[in-house]
Amino acid sequence: MKFWVEILIESESEDGELASRGVLQHDPFPSRFTVKQAIAWSAKKWLVIADFHRDHPEVFSAVWNCGNFSCALCEKFDQEDTCERSGRRCPIFKHTGRDSCAYTPFGDYINAQNQKDLRSHALSMYNLLNLIYQEEENKK
């Protein structure tokens, strides 16, 4: 069986019209990813979102990207909002010590009030995930 994860990038312009839509797909399903693959895929999602805001400066709202539908780490680790599955914790939880990404640049992103901040917070989330990826690499 073949699984696909789709990240729908859809946002409205100031006048309420759909500004742009894009889909990022990957196979296999994220729950089968290694930890490093899930981190890399999650980072890629944030780079796509940041690029969307760069390419569409007319869009003044956050891109809908609910974690458990678009984050490979949430798919791999989040079970009943605990950021844990089978006794293994999400690497973001390990890094922040918090059960939610609300305390990362993701929280800043969803609360951003302007285009510049949206892109900046998306890039900050991308950078955080790259840092966490390096932490995983250094465990060897």
Image: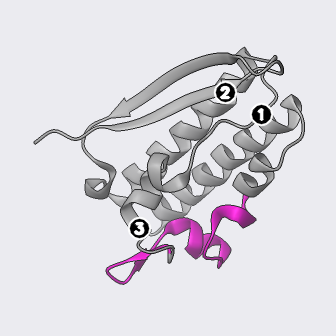
Q: Residue at x 73, y 37 (%)?
A: 62
17 on left or right of 25: right
Q: Quick one: SS at disc 3?
A: helix
Q: CA distance from mark 3 to mark 2?
A: 27 Å
Q: Which mark is residue 61?
A: 1
Look at mark 3 in the image and give the residue it sits on: 77
- 10 Å crowding of disc 2: few (<14), some (14-19), many (20+): many
Local crowd at mark 1 within 10 Å, few (<14), some, or many (≥20)? many
Of the two numbered discs 1 and 3 in the rendering, the one whose residue sits closer to the viewer: 1
Q: Quadrant of residue 120?
A: top right
The answer to whether mark 1 and mark 2 are in CB contact below 8 A is yes
> Residue flagged by tag 2: what amino acid is it?
Ser
Mark 3 or 2: in front is: 2
Look at the image and tell me in which quarter the N terminus lies. Answer: top left
Quadrant in which residue 31 is drawn: bottom left
Q: Residues within 10 Å of mark 3 (few under 14, many from 20)?
A: many
Q: Image point 74% across, 46% down: which residue? A: 124
